[in-house]
Image: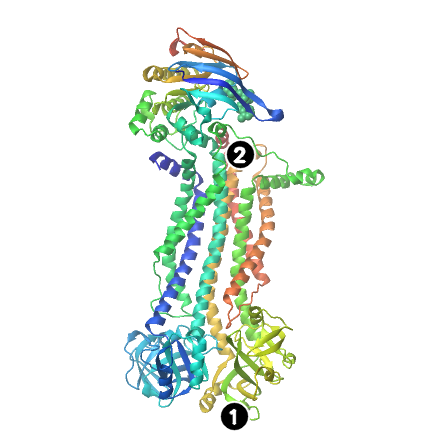
Amino acid sequence: MNLYTLQSLSKDYGEGDSLVRALRNVNLEIPSGKFVVILGASGSGKSTLLNMLGCMDNPTSGRIFFEGTDITSYNKRQMTQFRKTTIGFVFQSYNLLPDLSAIENVEISTEMAGLSRKDAEYALALVGLSERAGHFPGQLSGGEQQRVSIARAIAKRPRVLLCDEPTGALDFETGIKILEVIKQIHMEQGTSVLLVTHSQEIAKIADIVIRMRSGEIISVTGNAEPVEPCEVVW
Amino acid sequence: MERMTFRLMFRKMRHHLPQLIGIGLLVMVGTAFFVTLYTIYLSYDRRANELFINQCYADVTFYGSFDEYDVAAVESSEGITLARGRIVHDFRNGDIILRAVSLTDEINIPYIHEGTLPSASNECALLKKHAQAHGTGVGDTIVLQGKSLRVTAIVASPEYVYMVQNERAMMARPDRFGVVFVTNDFFNGTYNEIAALGEITKDEAEIIGESIGAARTVTQDNQVNKVLFREDLKQIRTFSYIFPLVFAFLIVMVIYVMIKRTLALERRQIGVCKALGMTEGRLLLLYIAQTAVVALLGAVFGCVAAALLCDTIIGFFSVMFEVPGLAYEFYPVLCGCVILAFMALSAVSVLIGARKVLSPMPAELMRPRMPSGGKQILLEKAAFLWKRLSFNTRYALKSALRNKGRFFAVLLGMCGSCALLTFALGFFNSAEYTQTAYFDGFANYDVMMEISPMPMEMAHPVEEKFDVINRALMIPVKIDGDEYPLLVVEENFDMQRIDTSRIRDGVLIPRHYARKWNVEAGDTLRINDADVTVTAVFEQNFGLSIYTGYDYVKEIIRDFVPVYNVIFARGADISELKDLSLRYSFSYSTLPDDKNSFASLMESLNTLIWFMLACAVILGLTVLYAVGLMNLSSREYEYMFMGVMGYSLKNIMNAHIKETLIQLVIAIPFGFALGYGILNVVKTAFSSDNFVLSAAKYNESYAYAGIAVILMSALVAVVSGFYVNRLNIVEGLKVINE
Ligand SMILES: Nc1ncnc2c1ncn2[C@@H]1O[C@H](COP(=O)(O)OP(=O)(O)OP(=O)(O)O)[C@@H](O)[C@H]1O
Ligand SMILES: [Mg+2]
């Protein structure tokens, strides 16, 4: 069964003169267990699509099936539950809670998912930040914050990891490290990954590349030989 | 709550610590005020009733001249379970009146603080308040009508919770009035009172009274002592509500604006939490718990403060009443309810402020919010006016109206503080005004003597001792089933300022009665069984009576025989009175005495006033500071930018001060009005058939209240000045990046 099936999905922002059609009638099938990259120029609707997939926003019309279940028909409680157990989200701007330390930021997520502190510690170790566990976001660099944010997303062992330009605010080398961590989790835990980027190079590490323009899918291509993140140059 | 959410909550509390402390302080003062007064109310009610029941407070007392047969007749009457005859007599010794009361077993039993009840005719028990005022103890002797009596006990009496001599007298000063309980053989003579126990109505009691030829029958509920007790209870309770209500209102306001701002600042974080799968309910709890914890702490501290304050406040009240065992008592239900009420209040305030903010989808919450500012304010649309204002004024107006919540919170803080100050000062003014109005305006006699009724043709021997005298007749009349005093006066009566030209064709009534009976000048009023005309309504604060002339009284009382039983007099040697009163056996009260005892009551009131003033100032400062700080930190960036653009601290503060001025101009008049409104509500609670408080407010009081609020604002402005001055541009830039 497909991980996601999208049927004529549309999202409009605003109304009247200021109407923006961020997604236009998107039909798409995403298989399970793949590393998928969504590629497109700025403003093409990538974030909007990712938000819909993560139940972070409601579409204007159309349906999204997650493993056969229509998640667009979910009520608020079900959506929250879906986000809590199934989705791990990594944001471009880290979005750690400034009042909690690194480990606490991970723990708040595991706690909600009913997992233990051990899971949080394991996730933090996975991104190589065990020594900085007690530090607050303000005391960490951008790359470190993004790693904490990845740890937070994966600690609860989600089925899907949604990453919105995780390297967008980082320098090249840090970006590579982040991608390596994501890839490693994908390989080790079999997590399906959907990663948004506007870099052609990063797209090379994917199994499947989805290209977007002006709210539409222009192509879905398979990648027979995905490269390792360390080989990527941009 | 899970551990992390809990931790998050406490960490978040640090961000608005000043506001939370402010809220806690408001809750604490509100709680302390309420719990203190309400505890006194409950404790007084309980202790006094204990005294009434345990000491067998007489249910009905008959006055007259009685023998054993009358006592037996009363006891055998239906409804009466027990009756005892006794003799009560007032002895004057210089300034001091001592009332000797023969002991009755099983009725009106004195409560023994110390010692044992007297058993011989040369022994006595003394009322505690009087004993205290004179430093008299067990074993000392006092002199009563030439006889010296050994004090064997210091006691309290259910009949003398209040030191009142009679219905018309002011509350007596404990050093001037005392009650001495003596054995039956101290007197030898007939009884002049019968005290009885039994569950009977006023009407039934009166029938019994008539059957034994009693001059007056008074049931327990109508005794001054009991009436004063009931009224004081009511007043204490009314008082306990006023301040906490104003406080509660401002607590809601401060929490509301605080939570609004906090949520606006933490919008993105809320989105993140929702993205992580936190439910809306959990998020709401996260914010509710912050203020609820503070409310809990504040209320608990308030209860502790009440425990510490209570006895001091009871001490002030003890000038008015004395009940054994009246002291701070812990009422768990009261404290629990107050704590819960404040927690609920804080939770509701958060709920109102947060409900809508938390509901959008996480994606929307995490997007930067569309700026709501930039809208034109109304005045801007009136361009020609707007352009004439200086930049500073324009800026002040705009920033004032940009955040209406905070603007109104400051406004309400000023208004509430001003109102409570106005009220407290006005309450003081009213008491003072009432005193002046009565003693310097209304009453115009030196002494009032109550004699046994005498025909008008006969002159009482005491009359010749005075320069000016007026005779009058005091008789009880019935209106709506209750008894009121009717004072029949002569046409040349000038001892009290009433319009004697109106007594010929009707009755004059005090305004308090007019309101109570819902009549005005010109209306008819049913007195006893007659319809009479009300010719005038006038202001009277003490010893309220209905007035009429000797001619018109015939309309009210059939077969009226002109007699007099009261003599008002001016211009004589009051010191002679004591001997005269002994010789002719009459009781009297002098105006200076009454004035003194009222003045000492006023002194005890002062403490309460200071307590209220302090609360009002705390309220004002806390709200102004807590909300002001929010204003400042939300404008930090703006001020900094102005600083970069070359605006001096003075310019910035000018804008700030102008905004404060706008608020003061609006808030102070409303504060005055609100304060006056509260005063009028309280006035009603403080007015009874014995005493009417006139609401009065002197101009100084308005000025003081206004100045105090302005000073508070100025103080907060100065603190703000330091804050703006300290602003650091580098730090400020970080804020923007967040
Ligand atoms: N809340 C909103 N209101 C109005 N328009 C919006 C809103 N959010 C997004 N848009 C518009 O929708 C379109 C798609 O936005 P989206 O954020 O999905 O683009 P993107 O592909 O993620 O771009 P980027 O690479 O810059 O992040 C854009 O034209 C954007 O301006
Ligand atoms: Mg985007």
In three-dimensional space, the C-alpha distance between marks 2 and 1, rounded to whole angstroms, equals 89 Å
**Helix, strand or loop at disc 2?**
helix
Query: In this view of the protein, which residue sits in the foreground, A198 or B634?
Result: A198
Label 2 vs label 1, nearer the camera: 1
Above or below B444: residue B339: above
Residue assigned mark 1 = B461
Q: What is the chain letter for disc 1?
A: B
Find residue B155 and report its horizontal and vertical position in percent: 33, 75
**Callout 2 touching callout 1 (CB < 8 Å):** no
Mark 2 and mark 1 lie on one chain; the one further toward the N terminus is 1
Q: Is residue B300 visible?
A: yes
Find residue B635 and report its horizontal and vertical position in percent: 54, 37
Find residue A201 and report its horizontal and vertical position in percent: 45, 10
Give a yes or no on whether discs 2 and 1 share a subunit.
yes
Q: Indicate the quadrant where residue B393 lies.
A: top right
Above or below B688: residue B307: above
Could you tell me how many numbered marks the image carries?
2
Residue assigned mark 2 = B637
Query: In this view of the protein, which residue sits in the foreground, B259 or B285?
Result: B285
Q: What is the chain letter for disc 2?
A: B
Give me the disc on residue B345.
Answer: none
Name the image quarter holding the N terminus of chain B.
top left
- Going 32% across and 88% down the picture, which residue do you hit? B185
